[in-house]
Amino acid sequence: MEKEDKRFALLIDGENVSAKYIKGILEELSNEGVITYKRIYGDWTSANMQGWKDVLLENSVTPIQQYSYTTGKNATDSAMIIDAMDILYAGNVEGFCLASSDSDFTRLASRLREAGKIVVGMGERKTPSPFIAACNKFKYLEVLQNPEPEAPECPERKEVMENDSAAGGQNTARTSLREIRRAVRTIIDDSSEDDDQWVPLSIVGDTLIKRFPEFDVRNYGHRKLTTFVKALDAFEVREVPSPIDRNTKKIYVRTRPGNRNRRGK
């Protein structure tokens, strides 16, 4: 029996998110499940929404009008929150995607998670940390729009990645590589059931997202978790053919013997 895809409601803060990100938003959310609601909120009498008007039809996104009654205040917040709660109580989705860089949706994300729903946040790098932490996952829009080609594994590249992460440079991640490396060691130690310490890479990836909602290997210049973990230069990765399907391989990871007691680095 095939596992059914999760259904998601996509709610976009049109006054806070640029229309140039729409393709990346839809493609990324499609990886999570089926998008059953696609709504965007804003004051459509405003010239600021013109960019969105050009892409609504081709992407089948439903515009929701919300007049700006007060100058300088985002009018979409209340309408988007009310709709989210209506959809929640209708009970026909398993998850929500909140596309905004506005911290005003932090409590909404928390409330949806309290109801057992998956919450995927998408916003720009300027998004406040509380909103990111309130989501199950958070994706940076800049990364979705312009994915960088995966860099070759080399010491120079690792050093640049580490420096960017620590100094807040070109690296888009908020969590430093040192912190990620330490977390991976801890996850392996906690998840391994034998002295060999081999742990499925999928467990490591899932646990990293639970600990760091914004974790995405693309933030560090990689496209796959396998190459990212190898580039951390503290772990061994091996592929084992599946006993059920020889064409399918399971990937395992463990901490290199010389690095197992160096959690602080």
Image (spheres, grey):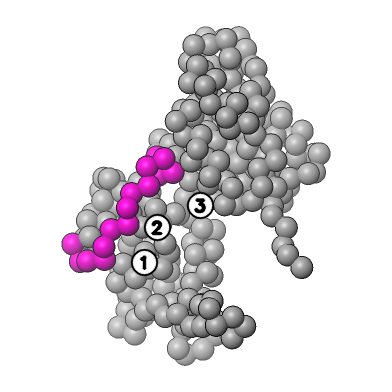
Query: Image quadrant for the C terminus?
Result: bottom left
Q: Secondary structure at mark 3?
A: loop
Q: Secondary structure at mark 1?
A: helix
Above-or-below relation of 156 to 63: below
Judging depth in this view, the residue of 61 and 255 nearest the camera is 61
Q: Amino acid at mark 2?
A: Arg
Q: Which residues are magenta?
A: 142-156
Could you say where residue 216 lies in the image, as x and y percent from the top left? 44, 54
Q: Amino acid at mark 3?
A: Pro
Which residue is drawn at the image coordinates 28% and 58% (left, top)? 151
Q: Secondary structure at mark 2?
A: loop
Judging depth in this view, the residue of 263 and 235 nearest the camera is 235
Which residue is drawn at the image coordinates 59% and 80% (left, top)? 245
Quadrant hosting residue 85: top right
Give the residue at mark 1: 227
Marks 2 & 1, CB-CB < 8 Å contact: yes
Quadrant hosting residue 104: top right
In space, the residues marked 2 and 3 are separated at their CA atoms by: 17 Å
Give the residue at mark 2: 223
15 horizontally vs 119: left or right: left
Which residue is drawn at the image coordinates 52% and 40% (left, top)? 25
Residue 229 visible here: yes
Report the mark closest to the observer, 3 or 1: 1
Report the mark closest to the observer, 2 or 3: 2
Q: Is residue 240 magenta?
A: no
Could you say where residue 58 lies in the image, as x and y percent from the top left? 57, 29
Marks 3 & 1, CB-CB < 8 Å contact: no
In space, the residues marked 3 and 1 are separated at their CA atoms by: 20 Å
Instruction: Assess disc 2: are there few (<14), some (14-19) or many (≥20) residues with their C-alpha within 10 Å of its C-alpha.
Output: some
In space, the residues marked 2 and 1 are separated at their CA atoms by: 8 Å
- Residue 26, which numbered label? none
